Amino acid sequence: MAKLFQSIEPALREFIEKQHIFFNASAASDGRVNLSPRDAASLRVLDTRTVIYLDRTGSGNETAAHVRIKNRLTLMFCAFEGAPTILRLYGKARILRRGTLEYLTFLASAFDNAEPPGARQMVMLDVDSVQTSCGYGVPLFDYVGERTTLTRWAEAKGEAGLDEYRRLKNAQSIDGFATGLLENETI
């Protein structure tokens, strides 16, 4: 039942853009595998082989650490309503550090210069393959709405508080790998 594609075809893009959540999976050569839920409103399909998402400050920064070491990344989307489908984007990722020219360029072109509170970096995926599968085992869920907790937390911290939090909690992965978030590290 699985189908493999070389790019994001129009029907696949339409499916991606209807989702409310996606999951990203990353891993270094050793250490833990990371799997994280993401708000699909933060993701943009730039073209048939490129997606980008605006990553917000969280309790860790595993994806950035893993991408620095081994730039492979998988994004997965599941249909929780309508026809059952799972879609995975496989490819090579890179991190765009907040405030860099490249980050600001994509903030303007893909996100209308709308940077949410707590924005930390962008993750760009160069897609080398796309896979769909049945999704028969994925349960049906009703979408209720977005949580506002992260936004309120980031607003309460302010820029200085977020910077300090990132230095303490986001500069290294749980396995001790540097994330490239600090100024003197290269990404």
Image (cartoon, grey):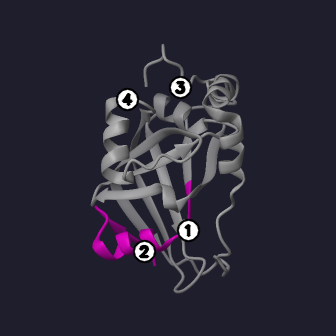
Residue at horizontal 39%, vertical 52%? Answer: 111
Q: Earlier in the sequence, mark 4 or mark 1?
A: 1
Query: What residue did someone put label 3 on?
Result: 181
Foreground: disc 3 or disc 4: 4
Image marks 1 and 3: residues in contact by CB distance under 8 Å = no
Q: Is residue 3 magenta?
A: yes
Element under disc 2: helix
Foreground: disc 3 or disc 2: 3
- Horizontal side of 80 relative to 1 (left or right) equals right
Classify 79 as above or below 112. Answer: below
Q: Earlier in the sequence, mark 3 or mark 2?
A: 2
Give the CA distance from mark 4 to mark 1.
28 Å
Amino acid type at image mark 1: His
- When asked about the image quadrant of residue 71, the answer is top left
Query: What residue did someone put label 4 on?
Result: 100
Amino acid type at image mark 4: Thr
Amino acid type at image mark 2: Phe
Residue found at the very far bottom of the displayed protein:
82
- Horizontal side of 115 relative to 10 (left or right) equals right
Residue 30, how many percent across, how many down?
Answer: 60, 31
Range of residues picked out in magenta? 1-23
State the residue in front, 48 or 107.
Answer: 107
Foreground: disc 1 or disc 2: 1
Q: Earlier in the sequence, mark 1 or mark 2?
A: 2
Element under disc 3: loop
Mark 2 is surrounded, within 10 Å at the Cα level, by few (under 14), some (14 to 19) or many (20 or more) other residues, namely: some
Classify 185 as above or below 53. Answer: above
- When asked about the image quadrant of residue 60, the answer is top right
